[in-house]
Amino acid sequence: MSAPVVEGWSPLGGRPAASDEEIFEVLTAAVFQARFRPAVVRACWPCIRQGFAPFAPGVMARWPDLRLDELMQSPGMIRNRKKILATRRNARDLEALAMRFGSALAYLRPFGGDEEALVRDIDTWAHYIGAPSIRWSVRAFRGSGTK
């Protein structure tokens, strides 16, 4: 039985992710939408995007706690420490996957169109998001998430 799909908003506007940075941005959008209304996240996204710019997993993976504390004080940021910490943990995990597979995009390729397998796999490492949000982000990676 499939987990229920939580409709989300994709910062990519419905097109597929074309880079590791875009995969990280979609995953970050899923983290922030978990237990939040997508409309709230969408309204705050310009500030979130500016705070996490350039959505480079390798850069954010090395951010010190002080940088995260500064982010918590940024105007317009959703000030949820768990979501910000989860985003850094996801950056570290995506960086490790990119090193293992050559890129985060290359990590996605073996799953082909098997959304269920990809959801199960991401659910083993992604932080602070449950299967419904993961399912939405998997669709957003491929460009079929909600605009």
Image (cartoon, grey):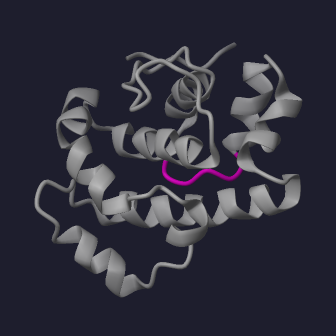
56 vs 106: above or below: below
* Overall secondary structure of the magenta section: loop
49 vs 108: above or below: below
Q: Which residue is drawn at 37% across and 60% down?
A: 52
Q: What stretch is highlighted in magenta?
A: 124-128
Q: For residue 71, what is the image quadrant? A: bottom left
Residue 127 lies in magenta, yes or no? yes
Q: For residue 75, what is the image quadrant? A: bottom left
**Placement of the N terminus among the 4 image quadrants:** top right
29 vs 56: above or below: above
Image coordinates of residue 41 in percent, x first then y, are 25, 38
Residue 73 lies in magenta, yes or no? no
Image coordinates of residue 104 in percent, x first then y, are 72, 47
**Placement of the C terminus among the 4 image quadrants:** top left
> Which of 5 and 76 lies nearest the eye of the viewer?
76
| In this rendering, position of residue 26 left or right of residue 91 | left
**Residue extending furthest left?**
75
Image coordinates of residue 91 in percent, x first then y, are 57, 61
Q: Residue at x 73, y 40 (%)?
A: 105
Image coordinates of residue 35 in percent, x first then y, are 33, 38
| In this rendering, position of residue 94 left or right of residue 42 | right
> Which of 94 and 81 lies nearest the eye of the viewer?
94
Q: Residue at x 25, y 30 (%)?
A: 37
| In this rendering, position of residue 147 left or right of residue 87 | left
132 vs 35: above or below: above
| In this rendering, position of residue 55 left or right of residue 45 | right
Q: How many labels does the image show?
A: 0
